[in-house]
Image: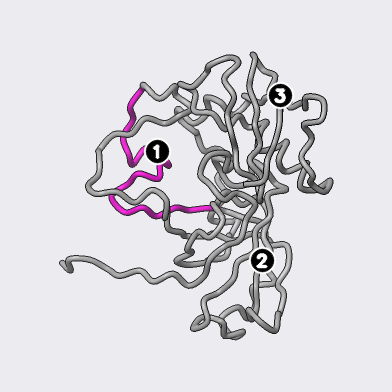
């Protein structure tokens, strides 16, 4: 048995989320969260993408690049379970794994040929931090990949938990309509860990080039301000 396999990134993705805090917790939860996949120079052959336009969705295998750490734990504490209940690492999608590899299903919006970056992919429903290295891309096949009868275990908790997002006077960030929609959808997912249910506490979330300040009371999230990051 070999001691290890070296994975080399083939691409990176550009998204609206510079930090882990606030990134959608699963792909597709914020459909308006767009990303642009840019291939590294040695992988910019148009032939490598021949036929990809025929697929509506793609699987991305990526590096949890902001979660690297020495060693690993057999159990983790998913935020949606309050941060106190432990489950097995292989029964979770925690980024803290023996191998920090993530899996995300995104919708392919378009394939664009550019002069400077070669062929890039525009995708929707992305749940990746800006600059995340991507190891591989595979087409999503509904006849084998979709299982409508599948059960979701403890992940079912929190699926219906959404916050109403509002803005204090003068606190609307300077974003276009699409950007504001994505921000509200991401905030509505409640980016706080469940164990940080501290009414009145002001949290800060990076979105594009802004630090967005908000607090939560019950099911109401109020944006109270913003500043340039």
Residue at screen point 82% across, 48% down: 176
Residue topped by disc 3: 222
Residue 92 numbered tag: 1
In the image, is 20 to the left or to the right of 170? left
The answer to whether mark 3 and mark 1 are in CB contact below 8 A is no
Element type where label 2 sits in the image: loop
Q: Give the number of marks.
A: 3
Measured as percent of width and height from the top left, residue 18 is found at 57, 50
Magenta residues, start to end: 85-104
Residue at screen point 44% across, 69% down: 9
* In the image, residue 73 lies in the stretch drawn in magenta: no
Element type where label 3 sits in the image: strand
**Which of labels 1 and 2 is toward the front?**
1
**Which of labels 2 and 3 is toward the front?**
3
Element type where label 1 sits in the image: loop
**Front in this rendered view, residue 153 or 100:** 100
Assess disc 3: are there few (<14), some (14-19) or many (≥20) residues with their C-alpha within 10 Å of its C-alpha. Answer: many
**Which of labels 3 and 1 is toward the front?**
3
**Front in this rendered view, residue 7 or 117:** 117
Disc 2 and disc 3: Cα gap in Å?
39 Å
Residue 55 numbered tag: 2
6 to 160, vertically: above or below = below
Residue at screen point 60% across, 16% down: 200
**Front in this rendered view, residue 218 or 91:** 218
Location of the N terminus (image quadrant): bottom left
74 to 154, vertically: above or below = below
Measured as percent of width and height from the top left, residue 91 is found at 37, 37
Which badge, 1 or 2, is on the more N-terminal residue? 2
């Amino acid at each position: 048995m070999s001691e290890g396999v070296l994975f080399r990134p083939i691409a990176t993705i550009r998204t609206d989320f510079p930090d882990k805090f606030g990134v959608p917790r699963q792909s597709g939860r914020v459909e308006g969260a767009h990303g642009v996949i840019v291939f590294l120079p040695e992988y910019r052959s148009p032939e490598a993408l021949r036929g990809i336009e025929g697929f509506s969705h793609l699987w991305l295998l990526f590096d949890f690049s902001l979660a690297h750490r020495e060693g690993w734990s057999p159990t983790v504490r998913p935020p949606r379970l309050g941060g106190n209940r432990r489950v097995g690492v292989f029964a979770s999608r925690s980024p803290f794994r023996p191998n920090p590899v993530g899996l995300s299903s995104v919708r392919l919006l378009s394939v664009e040929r550019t002069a400077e970056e070669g062929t890039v992919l525009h995708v929707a429903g992305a749940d990746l931090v800006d600059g995340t290295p991507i190891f591989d891309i595979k087409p999503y096949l509904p006849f084998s990949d979709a299982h409508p009868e599948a059960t979701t275990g403890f992940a079912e908790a929190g699926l219906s938990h959404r916050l109403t997002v509002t803005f204090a006077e003068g606190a609307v960030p300077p974003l276009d309509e699409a950007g504001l929609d994505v921000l509200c959808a991401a905030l509505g997912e409640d980016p706080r860990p469940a164990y940080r249910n501290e009414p009145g506490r002001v949290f800060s979330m990076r979105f594009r080039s802004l630090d967005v300040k908000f607090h939560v009371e019950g099911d109401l999230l109020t944006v109270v301000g913003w500043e340039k990051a």
